[in-house]
Amino acid sequence: MSDTSLSFPDDTHWMRRALALAAGVLSSTRPNPRVGCVIVRDGQVLGEGATQPPGGPHAEISALRDAAARGHDVAGATAYVTLEPCSHHGRTPPCADALVAARLARVVVAMGDPNPLVNGRGLRILREAGIAVSAGLCQDEALALNVGFIARMSRGTPWAWLKLAASLDGRAALHNGVSQWITGPEARADGHQWRARSCVVLTGIGTVRADDPLLDTRLAPTAHPPRKAVIDSGFSISETARLFDGTPVLIFAARADAGKAQRLAARNAQVVLLPQADGQRVDLPAVMQWLAADGVNEVHVEAGPILSGALLAADCVDELLCYSAPMLLGDAAPMAALPRLDSLEGVRRYAYTDVQRVGEDLRLRAHLPSR
Ligand code: AOF
Ligand code: ZN
């Protein structure tokens, strides 16, 4: 995927526009990747579009329809697409065929589609039809837009980030449980943006019991809210928990009670029975595998120190999304409960990938270097 031999000076400009279109549909394409497409001839945009919600047109079809609506014939034009056009009949027909039928002269693609149903076949269809194809332009930006889709396709688990909010000394709550509000309103609204772009907002029964959270996206309203999920091995969740607001809820449990499960189904909750890992909690990697099999690309974890620590220890977290408030809380609860270490040898080291000021706080993003 790095055949950029046929690049033209404005290619990067148009690809960035296609990437911006894809970034505009962060919360509405799940389980599909976010893709943008711009069709250009002689420096003029003929049509552009992004992936529509599942069953709706893909980015290329949106752009072709936009061009038609503006009265443009796209024959001989160049299409800039952030993901390899699809070659399969899924919920919609193949985009590669549509680009061939529209007689484009050139297609510039940022990254290949890791979906085994596509995986190079889209580019082959275009090339075999005599279209000039370049691939790999702005590949890193394109990969970053769809880390979750790529993780699900290539390793069978979603991309999970752990949202943390803590004082500068890493404390998430006072000794007596008081935690509202350590970070400021801007950080909380930013956190909701991350909830909104995810496929599932995941928490633990401890947090549901302690805070009765809504886990919704009220500070980042979206027409396509993510599902909610609770790890509740003992199936002890209150039937009147506030998170049951009509949005689909998944409850991962190790045991169920048919009557309660049926009553919760009426509240749009589904109980998923999974094996226990340690005689206590459901197996956390099994939760991630179940989610990926169900089409989940990105998981936003917002949980207490116990589940946060357990997910870290089980290697289920790809990225830390940490809001750090300029205060010191001293002897108080940690943001993640991790085993005591005697040396730094076994410590997990992350690499900061992004640091931003959000209101009075800092937002730190960090990945494991291997991811
Ligand atoms: C594209 N353009 O905008 C997107 C693509 O079931 P379907 O028909 O919606 O196909 C979903 C698959 O299509 C998805 O898994 C991925 O491989 C590809 N997504 N392809 O040409 C797009 N979103
Ligand atoms: Zn397509």
Image (cartoon, helix red, strand yellow):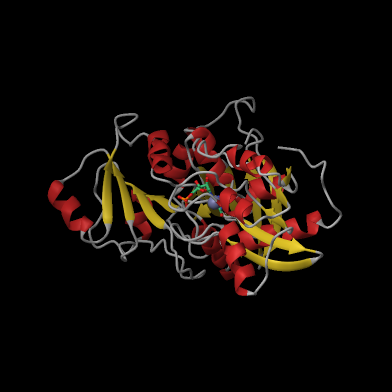
**Horizontal arrangement in the rendering, residue 234 relative to residue 199 (left or right):** left
Residue 25 at what x, y percent from top left? 56, 62
Q: In which quarter of the image is the C terminus?
A: top right
Residue at the farthest bottom position? 70
Q: In which quarter of the image is the N terminus?
A: top right
**Horizontal arrangement in the rendering, residue 336 relative to residue 274 (left or right):** right
Relative depth, front residue between 220 and 296 = 296
Residue 8 at what x, y percent from top left? 84, 52
Residue 145 at what x, y percent from top left? 62, 51
Relative depth, front residue between 67 and 202 = 67
**Relative height, residue 135 to residue 325 (above, below):** above
Res 330 seen here: no
**Relative height, residue 204 to residue 29 (above, below):** above
Residue plotted at (20% across, 60% down) = 266
**Horizontal arrangement in the rendering, residue 66 relative to residue 180 (left or right):** right
Relative depth, front residue between 354 and 70 = 70
Residue plotted at (27% across, 55% down) = 269
Res 275 seen here: yes
**Horizontal arrangement in the rendering, residue 154 relative to residue 80 (left or right):** left
Residue plotted at (49% across, 42% down) = 158
Residue plotted at (38% across, 55% down) = 228
Residue 334 at what x, y percent from top left? 52, 47
For residue 101, what is the image quadrant? bottom right
**Relative height, residue 266 to residue 255 (above, below):** below
**Relative height, residue 174 to residue 305 (above, below):** below
Residue at the farthest right position? 9
Badge count: 0
Residue at the farthest left position? 259
